Amino acid sequence: MFASAGRLVFSEMGLAVHLFLAVALAFSAYIAYVSYLLPVEEVRVEENGWFGTGELQPDDVTIHPFEVNVTPDALQDLKERLERSRITHSHLEDSDDFWYGFNSDELEVHFIHEPAAKGYRKVLPLLMVHGWPGNVYEFYKIIPMLTNPKKHGIDSDVSNLISQAQKRVLITWKAIRWVMVLIVGRSSFTRVQMEFRFLTSSPVLPSILLSLRYFEGTALNDSPIGLAAYILEKFSTWTKLDHRSLRDGGLTKKFTRDELLTIVMIYWLNGNIVSSQRFYREFFLDDRNNALQKYVVYSFFIDSRRIAEYKAVFGSSNCTLLWTERDVRQNATGASVRRLLSDSVTSKELSDEQRNAVQSAILCNDYILIEGFPGSGKTTTVVAMLRCLLEMNRSVLLAANTHSALDNVLAKLRKHTNDSKILRIGNSGSVHHSVADLTLESKINSANEDKYTAARKILKDTPLVASTCHYVPRDVLFSWRKFDYCIIDEASMVLEPVILSAIAAGSRFVLVGDAHQLSPLVQNRKCSEEGMSVSLFERLQVHTEAKHSLESQYRMNSTIAKLSSNLFYENRLRCANEDVARACLSSSANFKSSSSENGLTNMSPLRVLVTGAAGQIGYSLVLQIAKGDVFGKDTPIVLVLLDIPPMATALEGVEYELQDCALANLKGVECVTTEKEAFTGIDYAFLVGAMPRKEGMERKDLLAANVKIFKSQGKALADFAKPTTKVIVVGNPANTNAFICAKYAAPKIPARNFSAMTRLDHNRATAQLAMKAGVSVGDVKNVIIWGNHSSTQFPDVKHAVVTKGGQDVDAYSAVNDTAFLQGPFISTIQKRGAVIIQKRKLSSAMSAAKAACDHIHDWHFGTKPGEWISMAVPSDGSYGIPNGLMFSFPVMIDGATKEWKIVQGLPLDDFAKSKLAETQKELEEERDDALKACDAASM
């Protein structure tokens, strides 16, 4: 097939070569690059596999010798470059190499060929792939070991396969795969085995290569010192990371100087450093590969007898030939999926049992059953499985027997993934309000494009589609879209005819359930006796090799668990740990109900922090918290009161008054003056204390003063508070203070745990609207405060509902005064705080404290169905507000998860849009000024 070996000698290089190695061993640094911003032509892989420029040319498949040409001019150029450097000389010995090549589709392909031992006619060639940035010379030591009666070696590393610099971009997996097919098709071999492990466990290389275009080759090819340093640094640290601390990089511990120089010289003399790296860069530019780059081991056969078939299908943009979806799944090893699982889900989130179940599900060929005993964490396992599959860019149909089970999974999943990846299919009236914005109707309403175009895009591209099993056969989507995985929760409850339509929509399916808990409901006795009440889940359990059981439960103590285990689970149900096994309520002969006194005795108190507690807002706030207006009268509370040291005596006075109130649920009061004491172990934080605006003080001055306070408190939250701590910022400028606090509490405490109080403005707007409409405040709901807690805020009643005369009407109809609602009403809310200061000579205290309590009460217990409140929260891009900006939105809150969600799809007219733009601009200016103040404070 290939020509015989040739020889390359570097002996003419003399003193210049000596210097070259010394420089190579002395330097280990990356080079700064400047990109050529030139327009490029995108390659399209066609049936004929032509990758060249211009007209299609016939392939030149003649095998011809290729040699690394060591010309006098090249050596003279190298000498001159080295002489101009200021590095001492070093010894370098000669080395050799042998290469041959042919032209395939205008890509010059070079290779090493070592023929099989004599007497062996049938050989399965091995295409060996080495590590980058080495080259074929690395195989010289092992090639002789492979030329025995049982093995045959051939190297065609995809990064060094193309030695000629390519003329067009995007020479990626499709192009390389096609070249490999052509090589095998033009050979005498029937099949070729190839395996390579791709790419790196380090995020550094992808980030470097993503930034490269064609400038790197230009820079490195012009500098032998740079080229050697660039390559040899990787031979040092990638061989063993500890070598970086050695003076010579530990290079000669594993390689000879001759070997190192030969590898570098092959790159220098052929100028192919670009070809060796473009493949990697363009791989990382393909978003589809990003989730798999660290986890997949590829192994496949190229069969020359199927070349025609490959050609026929390769023209299709949907075909990836040697790397199909099935290839990736089949060749992903358990170790690679464990790494993905470890990166996606923390060790504390899953037990080993649950983790193994997730891994088994991802790697299953056709199906797997996950049998989850009561309290074993079936939902947690399903959520982790979905997180991994979405990370791997897999499409998933999630189905369940009931809406509640389905929405419960989605509510937990959306904490960990972008909502754009989830679509809830079904009747909107049956969907829980916490995930209502994930429905197709809601997504279409919030889209900025044509509704038909938006619907088609959403249905086609959303990777996770969730539906009840009963709805699947009724929706046309499932007649044309197929999924990589179908995961069915509550599978043991679903009738077999119903479940079949769901699993038919996926290439493989995962059934999660417990046949011992709930079976399909069949009312007809004859049908039940004939087997209709036996689920597919129960029927498939006979195949034990496809079943994974979750036997450790977290719900019952050992006594209760033992009863269930003996009666239903053949003594397999067990407690997950000793804490679960021993958990119980304290015994009480007078235990009559689950009401206040006994409930309080057995609940851990919530630690609630109030900063600025000696001030007038804090003073008004602590009593409402202590007497149960926020967390309920049955919830025990420990109040932590923080203020500056000069206010320590005043804090003691507040403590004495709280003691005198004799409140049953107040379990303690702690007065502190340091952040460490204040923030340690808290569950909720009311950040009230801030520098007040004084006469003559500009906004920038106020920001600069408060930035120091909230930057410090953010760091204290990160250092001492629980990761689940919920924070409300009351001190002004509240939005920007909350932004700074969240910035410095990250990443321990997520940004969505921070909010700024616009509930005061919300309450003011509700009250003003009620007075104008002649109703009580209880008859008004769904007003909105958009933007900043300042005079630029936009109080919006366009979507508010007023109950008047027993009928629900919109606010504009209830008031019947558009001029008022778009004029005096807005200015009244915007200026209300200033008016109160003018009247009382003090800022709002009673109303501010009430609003802060309302804010946290609804965050803790959730909003009422169909109602929303106003909260300043980090923007997720909704309504065109930049991501991360602390902006007041209408939000709904799920009391079970204590997670808020911005209400989506509300139409905004031009008047509203102009108001949002005004308050957004102010917030962006505040944010920028605050960040500058942070930088200045750090200097």
Image (cartoon, rainbow, N blue to C red):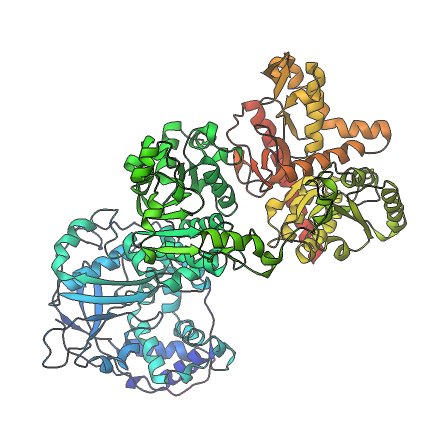
Q: Does 172 lie within the magenta span?
A: no
- Observer-nearest of 682 and 456: 682
Q: Quadrant of residue 422?
A: top left
Q: Could you tell whether 323 is left or right of 920 in the image? A: left
Closer to the camera, 234 or 105? 234
The C terminus, quarter of image: bottom right
The magenta stretch spans which residues?
A: 86-92
Position of residue 389 relative to residue 60, above or below, is above
Along the viewing direction, whichever of 45 and 356 lies nearer the viewer: 356
Q: Is residue 771 left or right of residue 650?
A: left
Residue 159 percent location from the top left of the image: 30, 65
Q: Is residue 176 above or below residue 669?
A: below
Give the x, y percent position of residue 101.
19, 69
**Magenta portion: prevailing SS class:** loop
Q: Position of residue 417 (x, y in %)?
A: 48, 46
Above/below status of 717 relative to 869: below
Q: How many numbered marks have been drawn onto this rendered protein structure?
A: 0
Q: Tell me, yes or no, if residue 57 can be seen here.
A: yes
Residue 825, quarter of the rendered image:
top right
Residue 757 seen by the camera = no
**Position of residue 523 measured from the top left corner of the image (x, y, whole percent):** 38, 32
| Residue at (28% x, 77% y) in the render | 139
**Picture quarter with the N terminus:** bottom left
Could you tell whether 345 is left or right of 54 in the image? right
Q: Nearer the viewer, residue 562 or 84?
A: 562
645 to 891, vertically: above or below: below
